[in-house]
Image (cartoon, helix red, strand yellow):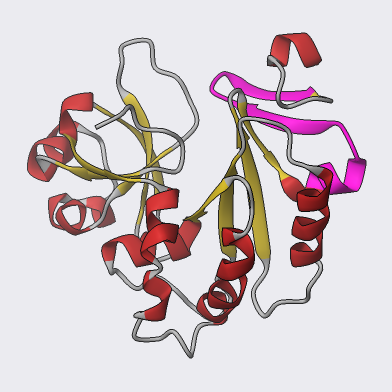
């Protein structure tokens, strides 16, 4: 099991112990954590703990915490979720616009040179089976691109964002140094706000070290 990366989902090995030690809100007790994974967020802890976010059934139910590495029982990545394609099996696949949109876009995303994954509420619901989706749920995607995206693919992705799908698309591009919003890159043609483990950095080339490109 590799080191967890931002947007990965983690199932806990001992939810009761974690709930007893961490200062958690009432909705995020041991019973909930036994069912629901936590999501890795972008931050850095000097003691080796993992920065995580907890989510509940409601949009208002969000909580940031730190997880001991020994608590990782299972890790599912956004790319794992995309490869499993469980949106085809979801009981409300014809009712939820985000699921219909994802089913339509998946073949076009599969044609990209980089890996893609599903994050956000849709990724959470598909990975753990807890249905947190509603009619206004976004489709949050992650592209893993170690090298700059080819211009043809940028244009194809821009067409996806402007296609007028039923659900709003949010595409983040992960580079070796952080992640940025594809929509911002297309709008500016260059400078983006790169989210790194030590905070956001405004840079022109997100595939270069943040300290070299800012």
Residue 63 in view (yes/no): yes
Looking at the picture, tell me which residue is in the foreground, 138 or 118: 118
* Magenta residue span: 184-202
Q: Is residue 151 left or right of residue 11?
A: right
Residue drawn at 68 percent across, 14 percent down: 209
Q: Is residue 201 magenta?
A: yes
Identify the image quadrant of the N terminus: top left
Residue 60 in view (yes/no): no
Q: Is residue 184 left or right of residue 121?
A: right
Looking at the picture, tell me which residue is in the foreground, 109 or 13: 109
Q: Is residue 213 left or right of residue 91?
A: right
Identify the image quadrant of the C terminus: top right
Q: Position of residue 185 (x, y in %)?
A: 82, 42
Q: Position of residue 121 (x, y in %)?
A: 46, 62
Q: Is residue 98 left or right of residue 201?
A: left
Q: How many marks?
A: 0
Q: Position of residue 133 (x, y in %)?
A: 44, 73
């Amino acid at each position: 099991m590799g080191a967890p990366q931002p947007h990965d989902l983690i199932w806990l090995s001992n939810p009761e112990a974690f709930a007893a030690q961490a200062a958690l809100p009432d909705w995020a007790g041991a019973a909930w954590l036994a069912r629901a994974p936590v999501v890795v967020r972008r931050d850095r802890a000097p003691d080796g703990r993992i920065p995580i976010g907890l989510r509940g059934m409601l949009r208002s139910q969000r909580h940031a915490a730190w997880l001991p590495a020994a608590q990782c029982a299972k890790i599912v990545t956004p790319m794992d979720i995309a490869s499993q394609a469980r949106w085809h099996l979801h009981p409300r696949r014809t009712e939820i616009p985000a699921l219909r949109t994802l089913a339509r876009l998946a073949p076009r995303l599969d044609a990209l040179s980089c890996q893609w994954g599903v994050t956000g509420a849709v990724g959470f619901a598909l990975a753990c089976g807890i249905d947190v989706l509603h009619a206004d749920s976004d489709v949050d995607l992650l592209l893993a691109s170690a090298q700059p995206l080819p211009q043809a693919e940028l244009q194809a992705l821009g067409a996806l964002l402007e296609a007028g799908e039923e659900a709003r698309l949010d595409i983040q591009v992960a580079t070796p140094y952080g992640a940025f919003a594809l929509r911002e890159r297309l709008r500016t043609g260059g400078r983006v706000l790169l989210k790194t483990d030590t905070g956001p950095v405004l840079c022109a080339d997100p595939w270069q070290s943040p300290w070299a490109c800012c």
